[in-house]
Image (cartoon, helix red, strand yellow):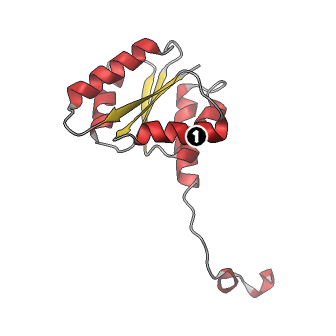
Amino acid sequence: MIAIIIGTHGIFSEELLKSSEMIFGCQENIGTITFKPGEGIENLVEKYQNLINNLDCKDGVLFMVDLFGGSPFNAASMIAMQNENMEIVTGVNLPMLLEVFGSREFSSIDELIGIAENAGKDAIKRLMKNVEADLDEDDL
């Protein structure tokens, strides 16, 4: 099973995992990385390496980080660029994680990236307060 590492600014990664497990149940082969004030890229790279050493990564690693170009992304990219079968997706959110959890047992890492991207985008919705104004008369 593909290992998943969630890396974010602050403790967002830990709380995101807790929230997702409330809905989907306890997950295996997954870990979180936090980036706290006063830490640098070197600290993050070390945290990622330690986690990689403790996860089963033979099927690959999917890094799910908060911001493209942020420190968790930059540190993960330093590792992913030097290793086969390690990929990164940004914009991690709850719907994205849930879809990846439901698909990772039977999906390749490339398929998981597509699933994550689509789930993240599809989860963005707007509440329509005046639905009738948007309906065509034929729809009534």
Q: Nearer the viewer, residue 61 or 110?
A: 61
The residue under label 1 is which amino acid type? Ser
Residue where numbered disc 1 is placed: 20
Quadrant that contains the C terminus:
bottom right
- Residue drawn at x 35%, y 23% is 48
The answer to whether one can see residue 9 in this image is yes
Q: Position of residue 125 (x, y in %)?
A: 57, 63
Q: Is residue 139 left or right of residue 126?
A: right
Vertical relation: 103 (above or below) 94: above
- Residue drawn at x 62%, y 27% is 107
Quadrant that contains the N terminus:
top right
The answer to whether one can see residue 115 in this image is no
Vertical relation: 80 (above or below) 103: above
Q: Position of residue 26 (x, y in %)?
A: 62, 29
- Residue drawn at x 43%, y 46% is 91
Vertical relation: 101 (above or below) 60: below
Q: Nearer the viewer, residue 9 or 74?
A: 9
- Residue drawn at x 39%, y 43% is 66
SS of the residue at dot 1? helix
User: Which image quadrant is residue 124 in?
Assistant: bottom right
Q: Position of residue 115 (x, y in %)?
A: 58, 39
